[in-house]
Amino acid sequence: MRLRDAFRQAHRDLGNFLEAEVLLKSCLGLERQDIYLNPDRGLTRYELNLLEEAIEKRKDRLPLAYITGKKEFYSLGFRVTPDTFIPRPETEFIVDAVLEKLPITNYQLPITIVDLGTGCGNIAITLARYIPHSRIYATDISKKALEVAEENARKHRVEDRITFLEGDLFSPLENYYLEGKIDFLISNPPYVMRSEINSLMPEVANYEPHIALDGGEDGLFFYGRIIEKAPLYLKPRGYLILELGIDQASQAKETVKKTLEFESIEVVKDYSQIERVIVARRAVISNQ
Ligand SMILES: C[S@@+](CC[C@H](N)C(=O)[O-])C[C@H]1O[C@@H](n2cnc3c(N)ncnc32)[C@H](O)[C@@H]1O
């Protein structure tokens, strides 16, 4: 079969031109332009089998990123597997918030960042790339996700500045004496209400790790736990930056206010005008 016919077939089977292009590129190891410059190139039997298998998987609603093993985040390429959550574009607002709040006057001072629930390491690794004077600690409860994150860190050559730690939220940080020393505490925690997980798109509900989605009965389980402990770890004027699910901003704000430990709270909207990220600044002196 020739490339042009394989492309037509994939497009017909998937009903989606872009997805057909992505699968063709991935299965044949081609760049985009190769598809259009060599439409008469023949496919080997092996390539055709790979493509047919990939199309079948996609028709079963396996996410494209798990088929190709790749996902772009903040213009960097990350390996993803079914053990890792697939990075979403709205999470890039966390990176933007950190870069915006980065102190520019003390550019040479090391910046300490903690990323809770790092997944494939996308936020931590992006920040390490953009902030050369950063020292990052990234935790996750999933050992398999951390293995992928470590591989991504090596790929982006930042493994010497990120310490990946397995365990529940802050608990793996216990031996690192980070109390009062963190400039940025960030997290995109699981925030889907447990009862809603199975009604999400099949790509998410059937294939993404539920441990990455499940935010407890009300979706807010992790916010309470992170916000409660954040003041202990943050430097005075350090920032707590959390991604939020739809309609979770007001409750998250209330929880932050109740601690009496933060001097300012902002909420950043995403491309769809959804309140997506909360940015809270630790007060110099506690108001308690
Ligand atoms: C929504 S995903 C975010 C992944 C990645 N940081 C991102 O933004 O794309 C949530 C992550 O939290 C991890 N996680 C779930 N429960 C956890 C816990 N108790 N402690 C640490 N990490 C946890 C999951 O394994 C998953 O990788």
Image (tube, helix red, strand yellow):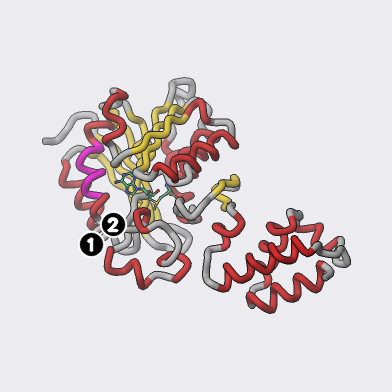
Residue 200 image point, x, y percent = 39, 70
Q: Is residue 14 above or below residue 86?
A: below
Q: What residue is shown at x 44% (from left), y 21% (from top)?
A: 109
Q: Hey, which residue is sitting farthest top in the picture? A: 108
Q: What residue is shown at x 11% (from left), y 36% (from top)?
A: 288
> Which amino acid type is shown beneath numbered disc 1?
Asp
Residue 257 image point, x, y percent = 19, 46
Which label sits on residue 244? Answer: none
Q: Hey, which residue is sitting farthest left in the picture? A: 288
Q: What residue is shown at x 58% (from left), y 59% (from top)?
A: 67
> Which amino acid type is shown beneath numbered disc 2?
Gly
Magenta stretch in the rendered image: 223-230
Numbered disc 1: secondary structure: loop
Label 1 to label 2: alpha-carbon separation: 7 Å
Residue on which disc 1 sits:
218
The secondary structure making up most of the magenta span is helix
Residue 94 image point, x, y percent = 43, 46
Residues at marks 1 and 2 touching, judged by CB atoms closer than 8 Å: yes
Residue 143: image quadrant is: top left
Instruction: Return the residue nearer the eye: 152 or 32.
Output: 152
Mark 2 lies within 8 Å of ligand 1 (Cβ measured): no
Residue on which disc 2 sits:
215
Compared across the picture, whether 115 is left or right of 180 comes to right
